[in-house]
């Protein structure tokens, strides 16, 4: 099997490792808030401080993931 396909399939089962990989491909640093707010298949983020460039790997990781059962996105911006 092609290495990229194999890695993509493995990453579907581990959200954070896939997110880290996508950040590395894009040349950005994974957000600490993502790891801090990821527990037992649930991702609960407050997104007020997330920059536009940081959304791409985050949304792609969520799109491909098969393990998250709940994703919460909150904003306190007024």
Image: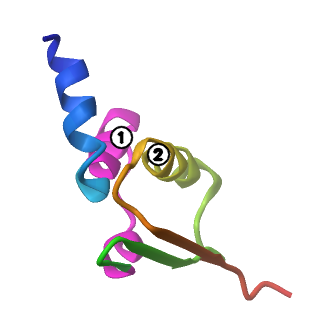
Q: Is residue 52 above or below residue 4?
A: below
Dot 1: element: helix
Q: Residue at x 23, y 20 (%)?
A: 4
Q: Which residue is mark 1?
A: 22
Q: Residue at x 36, y 40 (%)?
A: 22
Q: Position of residue 76 (x, y in %)?
A: 73, 88
Q: Residues within 10 Å of mark 2 (few under 14, many from 20)?
A: many
- Mark seen at residue 45: none
Q: State yes or no: residue 27 in magenta.
A: yes
> Residue farthest to the top?
2
Label 1 with label 2: CB-CB less than 8 Å: yes
Q: Nearer the viewer, residue 31 or 34?
A: 34
Q: State yes or no: residue 77 in magenta.
A: no
- Magenta segment range? 18-37
Q: Nearer the viewer, residue 15 or 27?
A: 15
Q: Which residue is mark 2?
A: 57
Q: Position of residue 34 (x, y in %)?
A: 40, 70
């Amino acid at each position: 099997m092609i290495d990229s396909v194999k890695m993509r399939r493995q990453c579907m089962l581990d959200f954070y490792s896939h997110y880290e990989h996508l950040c590395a491909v894009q040349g950005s640093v994974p957000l600490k808030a993502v790891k801090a707010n990821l527990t037992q298949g649930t991702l609960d983020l407050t997104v007020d401080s997330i920059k536009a460039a940081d959304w791409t790997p985050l949304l792609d990781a969520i799109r491909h993931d098969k393990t998250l059962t709940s994703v919460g996105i909150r904003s306190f911006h007024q």
